[in-house]
Image: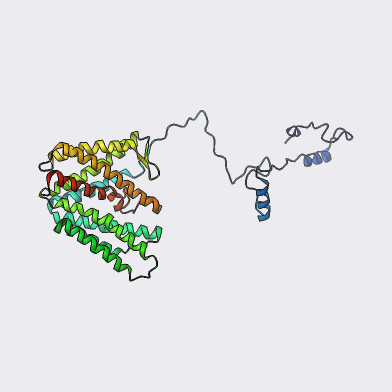
């Protein structure tokens, strides 16, 4: 480092007027080198912060000690060169699409086979999905919030709720729901009273959210064209989700509910509505006895709304719990609850509209 970097000539001024030019020689060069060491750089930190660092014996928080030092704690990010422009980044789907498609096809095959070969087998599929969903939900509640919703009465009561809905109709489903809630209250009494209220509240919520809403799928199955009604319900929900994903991923710019689910856009919602209404018109015209296309348009619109609200509802739950997925059972999808989020609130909506439009048989 030369002296000119400090703004003073080497021959005069720096040594004083009475000393004259600095003599040449090794000894004087050594002295001169010692006196022209770089001065320490004082970091731009308020005086109070310096005092705190001194009291704690800590090193300065920022800036190198000498000019020729490069701080290792905060390496500088390389600056992009004009000759290497950064191109636009491609959008990512965020999941393993190959695994997601494979799992979806497998689940679809199981559903179709059980629907059209033996109705009772599909009731069993619903019951298994309900039990697994309850296990995922209660496990996450306990892990993240310390809420111990009793799983045993929920699982037994949830499966019984689905079967009762299929065998005894709406009345059977309501009775099973009431008995399940009562079982949750009693079962939790076997443990200490601390946290009783939040545990049973979560248990009753889980009983309503998962098995009771799923019971409406079993209620659809009881009609003469029950398998086609269930297939219509499943297709419309899947098509709605697919339309929202495809249009939102390609054209989405305006957030729908950024505080709940930042990935959802208004354009995606419009895509869900358009896809679901088109699919609803086709399904009601060609798959449902006595159904018409305009009824399918209304059902598709309702499905797009309920599926979106169901997805946002579970997103709220997962945000509160601080998790991305409810489970890892389904590669590319997450857990069972991550697939039921749109289906559960949509089931009673489709069941009710089908009853209004074409009856219960």
Q: Look at the image and tell me whether residue 99 can be seen.
A: no
Closest to the observer: 251 or 38?
251
Residue 235 pos. (x, y %)? 21, 43
Residue 209 pos. (x, y %)? 28, 54
Total tally of numbered discs in the picture? 0
Residue 160 pos. (x, y %)? 20, 61
Q: Quadrant of residue 18?
A: top right
Closest to the observer: 30 or 248?
248
Closest to the observer: 219 or 152?
219
Residue furthest out toward the right: 18
Q: Look at the image and tell me whether residue 344 can be seen.
A: yes
- State the residue at coordinates (26%, 37%): 273
Q: Quadrant of residue 40?
A: top right
**298 left or right of 42?**
left
| Residue 347 sits above or below residue 206 on the image | above
**50 left or right of 242?**
right
Identify the colour scheme used. Answer: rainbow
**16 left or right of 43?**
right
Q: Quadrant of the N terminus?
A: top right
**276 left or right of 58?**
left
Residue 340 pos. (x, y %)? 27, 50
Closest to the observer: 94 or 54?
54
């Amino acid at each position: 480092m030369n002296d000119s970097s400090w703004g003073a000539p080497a021959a005069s001024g720096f040594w004083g007027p009475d000393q004259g030019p600095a003599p040449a020689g090794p000894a004087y060069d050594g002295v001169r080198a010692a006196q022209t060491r770089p001065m320490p750089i004082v970091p731009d930190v308020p005086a109070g912060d310096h005092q705190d660092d001194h009291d704690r014996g800590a090193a300065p928080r920022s800036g190198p000690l000498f000019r020729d030092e490069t701080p290792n704690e905060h390496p500088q990010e390389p600056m992009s060169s004009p000759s290497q422009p950064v191109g636009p980044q491609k959008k990512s789907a965020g999941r393993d699409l190959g695994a997601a498609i494979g799992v979806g096809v497998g689940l679809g095959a199981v559903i179709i086979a059980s629907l059209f070969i033996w109705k009772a087998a599909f009731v069993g599929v619903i019951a298994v999905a309900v039990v697994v969903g309850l296990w995922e939900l209660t496990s996450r509640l306990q892990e993240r919030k310390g809420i111990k919703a009793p799983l045993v009465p929920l699982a037994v009561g949830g499966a019984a709720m689905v079967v009762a809905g299929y065998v005894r109709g709406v009345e059977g489903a309501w009775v099973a729901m009431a008995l399940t809630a009562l079982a949750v209250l009693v079962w939790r009494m076997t443990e200490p009273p601390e946290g009783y209220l939040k545990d049973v509240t979560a248990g009753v919520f889980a009983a309503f959210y998962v098995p009771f809403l799923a019971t409406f799928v079993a209620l659809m199955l009881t009609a003469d064209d029950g398998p086609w009604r269930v297939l219509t319900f499943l297709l419309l929900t899947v098509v709605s989700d697919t339309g929202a994903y495809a249009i939102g991923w390609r054209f989405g710019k305006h957030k729908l509910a950024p505080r709940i689910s930042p990935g959802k856009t208004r354009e995606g919602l419009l895509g869900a509505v358009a896809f679901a209404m088109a699919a609803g018109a086709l399904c009601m015209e060609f798959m449902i006895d006595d159904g018409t296309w305009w009824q399918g348009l209304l059902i598709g619109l309702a499905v797009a709304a309920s599926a979106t609200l169901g997805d946002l509802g579970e997103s709220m739950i997962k945000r509160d719990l601080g998790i991305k997925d409810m489970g890892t059972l389904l590669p590319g999808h997450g857990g069972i609850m991550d697939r039921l989020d749109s289906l559960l609130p949509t089931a009673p909506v489709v069941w009710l509209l089908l009853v209004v439009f074409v009856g219960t048989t």
